[in-house]
Image (spheres, rainbow, N blue to C red):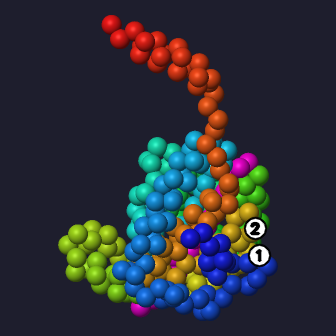
């Protein structure tokens, strides 16, 4: 079921100007509903687990997955889904909140750099260094010339990581404003989700267009060959999960990973520790 053409549909091509209006957040391709997609989704989940085991065993590559979305865009659900299938040994989630005083005292990439995966590791960024050209730009917390310069810094940073063996995949979970409001409403009525409600989420809604413009520029300038951005239709949670896991699986398959050769002489180990015991049961 490996199908690299699938991801191409959502990839932002370097040099191409992204227009989010051209991307339907409710897209579901040839799929009809969650039930119909269940088997394929389960296949990718299993494959993800196997590939992560190989990545860990081989220790040649790291994998960095950046997730960005507006509030209620589904970052948490995607993490639960994608990471839920991996072995916690070798996987980590890093959330990016309002910078702490220590983080704010450094350059904007400092906290991102120290959280990147080592070889053999998978790290998911829940929000990322892109917040510094998104929320920071929308609210004009730094002058324009400062955030404008950051696109180039981000590309250099990601090129450095890629050169060092880190695979980078970046996903923008694209929802419609109507779907966002529906999700807020559901939270309001679901006692298990009410704790998630924050007035700050509603306060960002008037900035919807400014966020779309900020995302368009960030994804246009920073989707590169070695660190591509994908615009994932995310109004349907099941399609979002399917798409993200499928794209991650296709990238990992392309790494052509192998289990390392044993570092010892297996015959000698068998002879030394197993046959002797068998030959002499008393
Ligand atoms: P959830 O609401 O699903 O729990 P979240 O990622 O929205 O997850 P919050 O604690 O609600 O987490 O919000 C974190 C906030 O920190 C976001 O509003 C985000 O825009 C903000 N933030 C992240 N990075 C920066 C930054 N570099 N500068 C300023 N604000 C930032
Ligand atoms: Mg939030």
Q: Position of residue 92 (x, y in %)?
A: 49, 50
Please report whichever mark, 1 or 2, sits nearer to the chain's N-terminal start: 1
Can residue 252 be seen at all in this image of the molecule? yes
Q: Position of residue 154 (x, y in %)?
A: 71, 63
Name the one closer to the observer, 245 or 73: 245
Report the label total. Answer: 2
Instruction: Give the secondary structure at mark 2.
Output: loop
**Is disc 1 in contact with disc 2, using a CB cutoff of under 8 Å?**
yes
Can residue 69 be seen at all in this image of the molecule? no
Residue for point 20% across, 72% down = 191
Residue for point 35% across, 11% down = 281
Name the one closer to the observer, 125 or 111: 125
Spot the residue most to the right. 15
Rate crowding at label 2 as few (under 14), some (14 to 19) or many (20 or more) other CA atoms within 10 Å. few
Rate crowding at label 1 as few (under 14), some (14 to 19) or many (20 or more) other CA atoms within 10 Å. some
Residue 173 belongs to magenta span = yes
Magenta segment range?
A: 164-178
Q: Position of residue 167 (x, y in %)?
A: 66, 57
Residue for point 46% across, 66% down = 43
Q: Position of residue 197 (x, y in %)?
A: 31, 73
- For this view, does 11 lie left or right of residue 139? right
Q: Quadrant of the C terminus?
A: top left
- For this view, does 10 lie left or right of residue 148? left
Report the residue marked by disc 1. Answer: 14
Report the residue marked by disc 2. Answer: 225
Mark sitting on residue 124: none
When asked about the image quadrant of residue 13, the answer is bottom right
Q: CA distance from mark 1 to mark 2?
A: 7 Å
């Amino acid at each position: 079921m490996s199908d690299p053409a699938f991801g191409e549909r959502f990839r932002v091509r370097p040099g191409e100007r992204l227009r989010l209006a051209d991307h339907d957040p409710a897209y579901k391709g040839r799929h009809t509903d969650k039930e119909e997609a269940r088997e394929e989704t389960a296949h990718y989940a299993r494959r993800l687990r196997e590939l992560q085991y190989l990545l860990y065993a081989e220790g040649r590559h790291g994998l960095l997955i950046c997730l960005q979305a507006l509030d209620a865009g589904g970052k948490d659900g995607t993490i639960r889904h994608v990471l839920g299938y991996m072995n916690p040994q070798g996987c980590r989630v890093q959330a990016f909140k309002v910078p702490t005083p220590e983080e704010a005292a450094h350059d904007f990439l400092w906290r991102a750099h120290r959280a990147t995966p080592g070889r053999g590791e998978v790290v998911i960024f829940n929000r990322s260094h892109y917040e510094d050209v998104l929320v920071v730009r929308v609210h004009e917390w730094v002058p324009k010339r400062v955030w404008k310069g950051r696109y180039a810094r981000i590309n250099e940073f990601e090129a450095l990581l890629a050169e060092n063996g880190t695979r980078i995949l970046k996903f923008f979970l694209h929802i419609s404003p109507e779907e966002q409001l529906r999700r807020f409403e559901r939270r309001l009525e679901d006692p298990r989700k009410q704790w998630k409600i924050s007035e700050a989420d509603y306060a960002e809604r008037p900035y919807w267009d400014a966020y779309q413009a900020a995302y368009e520029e960030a994804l246009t300038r920073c989707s590169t060959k070695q660190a591509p951005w994908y615009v994932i239709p995310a109004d349907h949670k099941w399609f979002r999960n399917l798409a993200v896991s499928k794209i991650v699986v296709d990238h990992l398959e392309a790494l052509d990973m192998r289990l390392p050769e044993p570092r010892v002489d297996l015959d000698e180990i068998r002879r030394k520790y197993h046959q002797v015991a068998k030959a002499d049961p008393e």
